Image: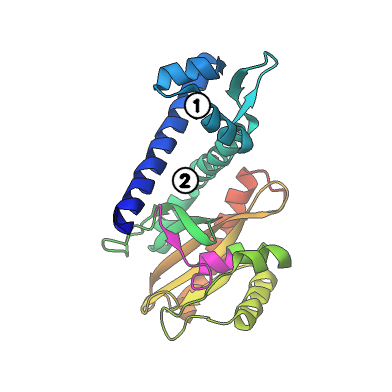
Amino acid sequence: MSSNGSNNGEVASGVQSVERALAILEILARSGEAGVTGIATEIGVHKSTAFRLMATLETGGLVEQSEDRGKYRLGMGILRLAGATTARLDLVQEARPICRKLASTTGETVNIAVLSDRSALYLDQVAGASTLQPHNWVGQHIPLHATSNGKVLLSGLSPDELAETLGAMPAFTDATITTKKALYRALDEVRERGYAVAVDELEVGLTAMAAPIRNAHGDVIAALSVSGMTVRLGEVRLKEVLPVLLESAAEVSHRLGWGER
């Protein structure tokens, strides 16, 4: 068999394993608990295959053995994943009316982003009146070093977390920060000022300003940004937008339990 054929076979096998693992989780969600023999029968595999799948899921904390030896149930890892999803849904739900008001007030595009996979994941977007057919960033992963949202998210990390999170820093434009020294200096400014600005750093002609959203403990869990064409968001206009942005980010944080306003 050719190497390409071998790779295709490995991919197919991997996909099949994932499908079977998902089927197991659905069975346990429906029945509460089940034994390896019953699971093997239901998903149509040999008992040894089912056992290997269960062992892998158990290692990941997605399933656990119940007091009744030989039976399995959903593990605490499921709650951790569900909790992360719920937190994001709560964030979007609480922030949506404030994002709409901010977009209406500024006329620009408003985005909510969180840290995910060493990038900024955009969870929600509301377009303002000044924006014609805005690019939809929702669901996209955007570089941390080249965006205002990314800088705000990075500013909330500890030195160790920052070192672990930062990877390659490619240049998207001539204005993109590409060295850690320059980025660390920019992050110090973000912490001191309480907001970040990116002018033409991700795309020429695109300017954005972001502020942190905090949880009840004061941790930076997301970033709220206003973005638009650089010709509209000049220095004077940014100064006008800043207090509204900061107030909006503080209001979302307050809704999530943060005490300061």
| Residue type indicated by callout 2 | Pro
Residue stretch in magenta: 138-152
List x then y, in percent, for residue 89. 50, 40
Categorize mark 2 by other alpha carbons within 10 Å: few (<14), some (14-19), many (20+): few
Q: Write the residue at 66% across / 72% down.
A: 193
Task: Give the Cα separation between the discs numbered 2 and 1.
Answer: 47 Å
Tell me if 133 is positioned left or right of 110 in this view: left
Judging depth in this view, the residue of 147 and 45 nearest the camera is 45
| Residue 200 quadrant | bottom left
Instruction: Check the image and report above or below for 63 versus 41.
Output: below
Q: Residue at x 52, y 67 (%)?
A: 144
**Residue pointed to by mark 2:** 97
Q: Amino acid at mark 1?
A: Ala
Q: Residue placed at 41% from the left, 22% from the top?
A: 43
35 left or right of 21 in image: right
Left or right: where 41 falls relative to 169:
left
Outermost residue to the front: 1
Nearest to the observer: residue 64 or residue 219: 64
Pick whichever of labels 2 and 1 is earlier in the sequence.
Answer: 1
Give the answer, above or below, for where 105 lies relative to 50.
Answer: below
Q: Is residue 253 visible?
A: yes
Q: Foreground mark, 2 or 1?
A: 1
Secondary-structure class at tag 2: helix
Indicate yes or no whether the magenta region holds residue 141.
yes
Residue located beneath label 1 in the image? 50
Q: Residue at x 32, y 62 (%)?
A: 135
Can residue 158 be spotted in the picture? no
Q: Residue 168, position in %: x, y?
A: 52, 73
